[in-house]
Image (spheres, rainbow, N blue to C red):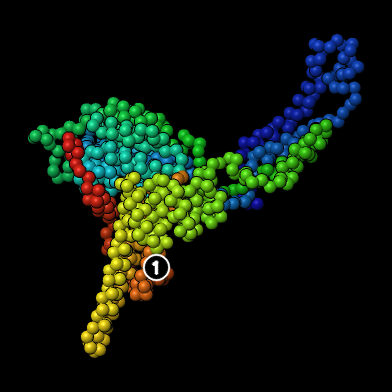
Amino acid sequence: MADFHFLRPFWLLLLLAIPLLPLIYRKARQSDSGWTRVIPETLLRPVISRYGQSGTSGRSPLVISAAAALVLAIALAGPAWRQVPTPLQQQNDSLVIVLDLSLSMLATDVEPDRLTLAKRKIRDILQQRDGSLTALVVYAADAHAVSPLTDDRNTITGMLDVLDPVIMPAPGNRVDLGVALGHRLLEQGAPGKGQMLLITDNASDRYQDRITQALEGSRFALNTLTVGTAEGGPIPLPKQGFIRENGEIVMTKASPSALQHLARNNGGQSHKLTIDDTDIHQLGLRPEDSEDWEDSERELTVDRFQDDGYWLLWLTLPLVLIGWRKGALALILFTLLPLTPRPAMALSWADLWAREDQRAPAMIANDPAAAAPQLSDPEWRGSAQYRSEDYESAAETLARAETPLADYNRGNALARAGKLGEAMAAYDEALADDPQMEDALFNRKIVEDLLNQQQAENESDDGDGDSSDDGDSQDGNDGSQDNQGQQESEDGTGGQDSQQQGDQANSQQTQQNGQNGNQGGEQSAEAPSPSAQQSGDGEGGSEGQKRNAPAEVSDAPLTQGQEQWLRRIPDDPGGLLRRKFLQQYQQRDTQSEEGDTPW
């Protein structure tokens, strides 16, 4: 009992009312009942005594009332002495922050500069949205996702320090691409309501119409946060002075009116960046601004003290029965009615309060095999079948859903089932409807490489058979040995490449789980594994994979030499983002917009 305490100790103030009960009771007895204003005293005297009581004396309720008040005060105060694991909940309101990383964000019209203030504001937003889903997108000449939707704010906070215009592959100010990418993240991974927050100094008129057209009919609002002043300021570059145009120093100006017009046309609000949290409150970015909560997808728990005050309510039951004798039978029935067995019903209790798309994620997470027959939506049923490793059934179910995401998930299921040709066709259907689906492009490339590898291995096997049939026996034996050695080397390399590609696919899927949700954040698609894809490659491929399989991870602590060697590896998250953004920029082949300024 050393940890015994009250969770709500202010309710103990109710005990102060117990000494006042005799005064209240005496006042009630001496006061007029009020009937004398309605019934003449001659008729009322035989029924009610002069003290407002009936002719027959009754038991004093002081003891019962004091005991009930004592028990209720202690119960409401929340006595607690033991801790139990409690599931954490997160706000079912997603936010994608779209940050301008063009050169204009280096302007010094505000101290120290626009970008520094913007990153400080992002930290404030993340601190107030702890446990809520938040993503970060940056843009210049193209848009890039720094982090998908995640409830771990440290994932985004760790990247803020390295965000700088110099890591972007090309200069520009394509705000339309940034908003479009943020909208795709919400469409693919937001489990409930969502909104976008654009942090920039200006939005060119040439892009506002595109943004409004792209967000037409969307359920996600676009808010804007203006950083900078209307007077503007110069843009300094390290060791190069200020940016100049035709010999004149460029003075980039913020345009709050343009951003306000953009937000109003897309269902949002606009505000100027403030030092305090006024802008965060006005734009409704805090968790308390929404009452829609759900269990955390990572199933996090925290030990919290259990409120055991409800057990004391059973002690108040006999006290209430004594004080309310005429209603005792009704109170007993009301108390025992919930304990009576109910007949079985086909409609579950959860069905009455939640839709299928609200119940499906929890059902699939608990038991996907049992959830599949209970789900009617083809995408949710296909997701459950995929999680239970019934890939062929998942592909058949997903074929009934005519959405790009369903085609993409069907391609992954077919690849898992070893039907690489059909998986390629499914990916092509998804890309025909959504050419910008990066995960489909990535997985399609993996499946295409595996098909080419299988074809090359089959041709190599045919060549070995022909060479073994020609020539004399000695030469044939030598050639067979050489070809066999060469084939083993190729098989080993193929297994290693396949394994590396599978690892890349799994890495891509790790990001995809935060970005692409198969409705409500539940992603049924995973990158095809090498074992499922090369089920028919023959013994040579499997032997190559075994030979090139990674060694088991050792639990032994690192030696001093190993630790010193690891310290030599530079920690450069900015370089990783720079190479990632450059690769995406080259793959997309984004063309520069005519009239777009490099700042």
Residue kind at label 1, given as amino acid type: Ser
> Would you place residue 490 above or below residue 418 in this image?
below
Name the residue carrying label 1.
Answer: 535
- Tell me the quarter of the image containing the C terminus: top left
**Total numbered circles:** 1
Residue 155, given in percent of the width and then of the height, sits at 37, 50
Residue 105 picture quarter: top left
Residue 460, given in percent of the width and then of the height, sits at 27, 73
> Would you place residue 143 above or below residue 46 in this image?
below
Badge 1 crowding class, 10 Å Cα cut-off, few under 14, some 14 to 19, many 20 or more, is some
Residue placed at 62% from the left, 39% from the top? 9
Residue 315 picture quarter: top right
Residue 20 visible to the viewer: yes
Residue placed at 34% from the left, 56% from the top? 424
Q: Nearer the viewer, residue 351 or 325?
A: 351
Residue 320, given in percent of the width and then of the height, sits at 77, 36
Q: Is residue 526 left or right of residue 484?
A: right
Residue placed at 29% from the left, 75% from the top? 461
Q: Nearer the viewer, residue 391 or 284?
A: 391
